[in-house]
Image (cartoon, grey):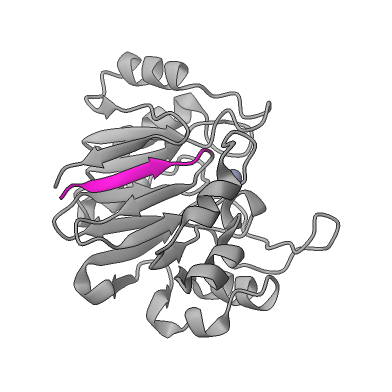
Amino acid sequence: MDTQLTWYGQSAFKIETPGGKVLLVDPWLTNPVFERGTDEIDALKRVDLVLVTHGHSDHVGNAVEIGKKTRAKLVATFDLSAAIVTALGYPGELADVETTGHMGGTLTLLGGEITVTFVPAWHGSGVSKEETAPSVYGGNPSGLVIAIRGGPTIYHTGDTDLFSDMALVSRFHKIDIMLVCIGDHFTMGPVRASEAVKLVRPREVIPMHYGTFPVLTGTPEAFEAELTKRKIRVQVRVMKVGETLALSEG
Ligand SMILES: [Zn+2]
């Protein structure tokens, strides 16, 4: 079986491994551009892992509700995991040392079916219980390198600016698929995202974190134009919200 990748809008993805395990990354399913969010959460029978890149609500999203419902374990950096448990109520027994790590560390999970490596991102990571409440410290934001046995290696950038150390990501992992934020305003936009692709050199790139709110003005068209301008050889796959792609092994 191929690996299945579903995009829910913003930075939220579902990954189903060839072994049938289910991972959710930055699971904000009830976002403004995915109309079936609530139904989709109801329909989630099995989730093995919930992975979160940083503490902002458009990334933590429905993590706590999904964790309680499915008993998925929380994969995040140490400070972020602690904040999501203590401030938001993710079940603590599902956020133990096995699935908690930090920058540069690699976790081997699900009996070796996947590894997750935490890599840096330039952003913020405060966790807020309510919009009006002061945020709780959530450590440094991260990107995630998810290597799937019998499947591709996926780099989810999280929310970030371009930074030259992105080149180090592909020194240690051959990246097949890069999920890259392009929306501008809160993250890099198309110009800087295209430079990020140049540093990481993935086989395929999927744009994310655009179009959810009016201020996220970066478009896949502008992103593709910037890649073309720089003669970067990469396959761009623009996903529709709610679409599932089959991904072959790396
Ligand atoms: Zn965001």
Q: Position of residue 163 (x, y in %)?
A: 44, 44
Q: Residue at x 24, y 58 (%)?
A: 147
Residue at 19% x, 49% y: name it.
Answer: 174
Apparent side of residue 192 relative to residue 33 in the rendered image (left or right): left
Determine the residue positioned at 38% across, 26% down: 238
Where is residue 229? Give x, y as percent.
34, 14
The image quadrant of residue 100 is bottom left
The answer to which of 196 and 34 lies nearer the viewer is 34
**Which sits in the foreground, 11 or 125?**
11
Q: Is residue 154 left or right of residue 40?
A: left
Q: Which residues are magenta?
A: 1-9
Tell which quarter ligand 1 is in: top right
Q: Position of residue 78 (x, y in %)?
A: 51, 75
Up/down of 141 relative to 203, above or below? below
Would you say 16 lies left or right of 74 here?
left
Side of 204 where 119 appears, left or right:
right
Image location (x, y in percent) of residue 13: 43, 47
The one nearer the camera, 135 or 14, is 14
Q: Would you say residue 250 sits in the magenta stretch? A: no
The residue at 36%/34% (across/down) is 206
- Reply yes or no: does residue 6 show up in magenta: yes
